[in-house]
């Protein structure tokens, strides 16, 4: 049967359609939604999407609706296991709380970067752009 | 339905476009092509940090600079309804057999005739033709 399947042995996303997926974007954002469609560029359509923000062991969900994601911005995606989803070892908090926590985390990161670039400058070096860049991938 | 076809059906709807550099553009989709290049009208551009805004009557965005687009829920609902109608039509076509295209055409034409007759049902002219709406009315009396 597999011999007749033209997609046998090729990587494709068609099996993931209509499943609940987590998508990680190049900018570090995490989206969770139902995959409704894909094309040859791995452009995705996500339905009933939420953006999940993680800070430490806490997370918060922001409802976002329908996304058309341009494929080149996707790092990875995977199906969400419904059984494991109900017993996450993480604590859900409100959107305000998680945004607050995220802002604090970003400020800490910026402070760290300032410290690093200052230390490098004192040693006659320039700060490495990779350390400061927010593009994780 | 492919992602780019969905984008095409979202024409004239409001949407949010985020670019790779983090800027967002809110506006109504005017047109798009197979490279995801898009035209928006009545646009509000927001800077990456979200604290500066620019208003512009229209703008053109090169597809390759886009990170994602967010479209209203009703666009997906529209597609779902379309798909339902199409699958229903296919299901109706099957039992008839024969040449599919011909069968559908005939059904379409007879449907048109019925709707026309129903429209005339209230008029006196309809009685001489003895068409269905009047006959039903008689039964009720």
Image (cartoon, coloured by chain):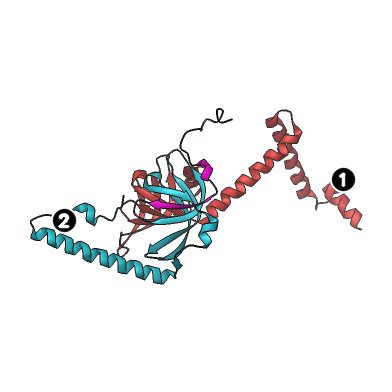
Which type of secondary structure does the marked residue at label 2 adopt? Answer: loop
Q: Is residue B24 visible?
A: yes
Disc 1 element: loop
Q: Nearer the viewer, residue B106 or A83?
A: A83
Judge if badges 1 and 2 mark residues of a common chain: no
Q: Residue at x 49, y 54 (%)?
A: A33
- Specify the subunit that label 1 lies on: B
The chain letter corresponding to cyan is: A
Q: Which residues are magenta?
A: A9-27
Residue drawn at 70 percent across, 35 percent down: B104
Is A21 within the magenta?
yes
Which residue corresponds to mark 2?
Answer: A127
Callout 1 crowding tier (Cα within 10 Å): few <14, some 14–19, many ≥20: few
Q: Chain of mark 2?
A: A
Observer-nearest residue: B23 or B60? B23
Residue A35 is situated, as x and y percent measured from the top left of the image, at: 51, 49
Q: Dot 1 corresponds to which residue?
A: B130
Which chain can be seen in red? B
Horizontal relation, residue B140 to residue B82: left or right = right
Residue B41 on the magenta segment: no
Looking at the image, residue A124 sits to the left or right of residue A47; the answer is left
Residue B113: x and y in percent read 75, 41
Disc 2 packing (10 Å; few <14; some 14–19; many ≥20): some
């Amino acid at each position: 049967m597999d011999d007749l399947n033209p997609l046998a042995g090729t990587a494709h996303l068609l099996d993931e359609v209509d499943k609940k997926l987590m998508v990680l974007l190049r900018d570090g954002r995490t989206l969770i939604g139902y995959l409704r469609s894909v094309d040859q560029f791995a452009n995705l359509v996500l339905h009933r999407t939420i953006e999940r923000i993680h800070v430490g062991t806490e997370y918060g969900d922001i409802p976002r609706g329908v996304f058309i994601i341009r494929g080149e911005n996707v790092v990875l995606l995977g199906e969400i296991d419904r059984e494991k989803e109900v017993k996450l070892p993480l604590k859900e908090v409100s959107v305000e709380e998680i945004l607050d926590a995220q802002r604090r985390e970003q400020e800490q990161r910026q402070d760290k970067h300032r410290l690093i670039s200052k230390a490098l400058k004192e040693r006659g070096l320039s700060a490495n752009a990779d350390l400061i860049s927010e593009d994780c991938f | 339905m492919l992602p780019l076809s969905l984008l095409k059906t979202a024409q004239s709807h409001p949407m949010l476009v985020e670019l790779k550099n983090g800027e967002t553009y809110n506006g109504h989709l005017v047109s798009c092509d197979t490279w995801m290049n898009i035209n928006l009208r009545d646009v509000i551009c927001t800077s990456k940090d979200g604290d500066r805004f620019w208003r512009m009557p229209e703008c053109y965005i090169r597809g390759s600079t886009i990170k994602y687009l967010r479209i209203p829920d009703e666009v997906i609902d529209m597609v779902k309804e379309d798909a339902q109608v199409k699958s229903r039509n296919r299901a109706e076509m099957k039992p008839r057999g024969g040449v599919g295209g011909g069968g559908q055409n005939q059904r379409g034409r007879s449907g048109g005739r019925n709707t026309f007759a129903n429209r005339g049902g209230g008029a006196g002219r309809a009685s001489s033709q003895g068409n269905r709406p009047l006959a039903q009315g008689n039964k009720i009396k």
